[in-house]
Image (cartoon, rainbow, N blue to C red):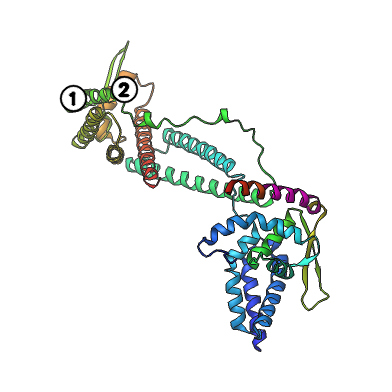
Amino acid sequence: MTDKQAGLELIQRYVYQVGEFLPSRQRGDVMAELRSLLEEGVEERARTSGRTVDEELTAAFLLEFGEPSKVAERYGGEPRYLIGPRIFPVFLLVLKISLAVISAACLAGFVFSAMAVPPWGPAEFWHVQALLSWLWRFAQTALVNIAILIFAFALIERFLPPTWRPKRDWDPRKLPLLPPEAERDQVKRAVEVIRIYGLIFLAAVLNFYPQWFGIVSFTDSGVLRIPFKDLGVYLPVPLIDLGWALTAALSSVLIVRGRWERWSRWAEFAVGLYDTVVVWLILTHSELNSAQATSAGRKAWVAFNNQSLPFEWLSRVIYIALVVILLGTLVKTGKRLYRLLRARTA
Amino acid sequence: MKTTATDVPDNLILELRRGAVILAVLAQLRNEQYGYSLKKSLGDAGLAMDEGTLYPLLRRLESQGLLRSRWRVEEAHPRRYYRLSSQGEAMLPALRAEWDSLTEAIRRVIE
């Protein structure tokens, strides 16, 4: 290979690399033009510098011309997107709606399967495995949904005319209101006071009148009173007390300070995480279908209900309620963490 | 692109020249030229541009309908020649008037 051939080969390799970064519809044309221009430019450089075209001269020329990806960027005009800014807001809206629908459908499916008879297997199966398999099904469905949406919107982006822009009637008076930042950090003292009294009441009942800590209903036919422990609900009293004490302590400090601060937001998140763990323990350690744990509860339910609804029905309602509470605390804790991390990076 | 004053950062010079070079390129392409000859004629007129900026600019102006191009293969290298399109020809006087007005206004502002 002659010196000139080595230089020209370097140009070919360079042009090929630029082409790798270009959209396919303009690749061939740009590559042909670029190659012609570069070859001519190198030859002109050789003439003016009194040298011959070789690899060293070509390399120096290409170095000045620029990195292949940057040259391609200049030719491409606009950055390339899988889902570009023109359709991204619509994509986000559709994604949120579809995830909300999937969540609702999965939750409905879970409630239905939990209430259905049979199968109504051993307690450990429907306590933990049913919940995990439901969460797994939700995750799978959500992921497939996200993948399909990304694929569909990427296709739309690919075939949308480059000049198309969404038509929007823009009116400054219709802009969304500013988020009430100042109000959001303001502590609602009345709410915190009610919370503290509520927690004291609950702690008093749980610790000193446990027979009233459960399902209580006053009706014409009498009083239904089934303590949670008679339903087989696991109640780790010291852990629950600690969680309520932490919440009440945080509320007390907030009443004194009057404003949410960074450390109190983190404390709120930590208490929420603790609560989630306690609810998880209650759910996984409860024996709602155990005959031994529920004999007293069954007797009270049958006496009150006159056998029109089976006791298992009540057990399942309790189970579903615990699952919903667990999901609620999980979502709330996750949102708090997300806001804290976002505020940190802002 | 080389700076004309060593104490002014390159990016400021680039910003300043960005709009002006479009007018210069359009004005030069009233007569058909290929990329390298255009670069030389701009450079000879004191408006040196690096190839990595000029050649993509030609493509953009063509995609906007201001230029048209064709390949010619009668010389040693096949070359793509550019010249003003009819839309570009119609646009050039208006751009020039805008440029005159702008330079006059800037002159008044900075003096």
Please name whichever residue, A129 or A65, is drawn nearer the observer in this view of the structure: A65
Nearest the camera: A117 or A48? A48
Give the residue type at disc 1: Ala
The residue carrying pointer 2 sits among few (fewer than 14), some (14 to 19) or many (20 or more) residues within 10 Å by Cα, namely some
Question: Which residue, as the protein is rendered here, is positioned at the far bottom?
Answer: A2
Q: For the image shown, how many numbered marks are present on the structure? A: 2
Provide the secondary structure element on which disc 2 rests: helix
At a point 23% along the width and 35% down the height, the residue shown is A243
Q: Is residue A161 visible?
A: no
Name the residue carrying label 1. Answer: A204
Q: CA distance from mark 2 to mark 1?
A: 29 Å
Q: Which subunit holds the residue at mark 2?
A: A
Q: Amino acid at mark 2?
A: Val
Task: Determine whether A204 is above or below B94 in the image.
Answer: above
Q: Main secondary structure of the magenta part?
A: helix
Dot 2 or dot 1, earlier in sequence: 1
The quadrant of the rendering that contains the N terminus of chain A is bottom right
Do marks 2 and 1 both belong to one polypeptide chain? yes
Horizontal and vertical percent position of residue B86: 83, 53
Would residue A323 appear left or right of B1 to someone viewing this image? left
Look at the picture and state if B11 lies above or below A124.
below
Q: Secondary structure at mark 1?
A: helix
On residue A302, the disc is 2
For the residues labelled 2 and 1, say whether their Cβ atoms are less than 8 Å apart.
no
Q: Quadrant of the C terminus of chain A?
A: top left
Please give the range of residues in magenta. B88-102
Vertical side of A74 occupied by A215: above or below: above
| Residue mark closest to the camera, 2 vs 1 | 1
| Chain for numbered disc 1 | A
**Residue A142 pos. (x, y %):** 50, 45
- Left or right: where B84 falls relative to B43: right
